[in-house]
Amino acid sequence: MSTLTLPLLDQVRVPSDLRRLPESDLPQVAAELRAETIDAVSVTGGHLGAGLGVV
């Protein structure tokens, strides 16, 4: 179970939600997505290099 706080990423459900965010918030969204990816891989195992490259 994750204890991450993802205030911006939690607001994004569909691509249009992401498009509505101000450009200044995008670095934080990327950081939250990286943290979520690392957290998920640490629980399930697997490779994360490609996913982090996409972020």
Image (cartoon, helix red, strand yellow):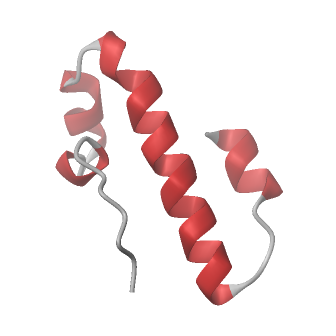
As drawn, 43 above or below 27:
below
Task: Indicate the quadrant where residue 47 lies.
Answer: bottom right
Give the camera-side residue of 3 and 55: 3
Q: Give the quadrant of residue 44.
A: bottom right
Q: Residue 3's x, y, as percent?
A: 35, 72
Residue 40's spot in the image, x, y percent? 56, 74
Image height of 28 relative to 22, above or below: below
Describe residue 10's horizontal placement relative to residue 32 as left or right: left
Q: Quadrant of the C terminus?
A: top right
Q: What residue is rendered at 50% in x and 39% in y? A: 31
Position of the N terminus, as image quadrant, is bottom left
Give coordinates of residue 28: x percent, y percent: 40, 31
Q: Residue at x 57, y 61 (%)?
A: 37
Q: How many marks?
A: 0
Would residue 1 appear left or right of 45 to someone viewing this image? left
> Residue 35 location, x and y as percent?
53, 54
Q: Nearer the viewer, residue 17 or 27?
A: 27
Q: Residue at x 25, y 41 (%)?
A: 8
Left or right, 37 with reference to 15:
right
Position above or below: 15 against 3: above
Identity of the residue drawn at 40% across and 24% down? 26
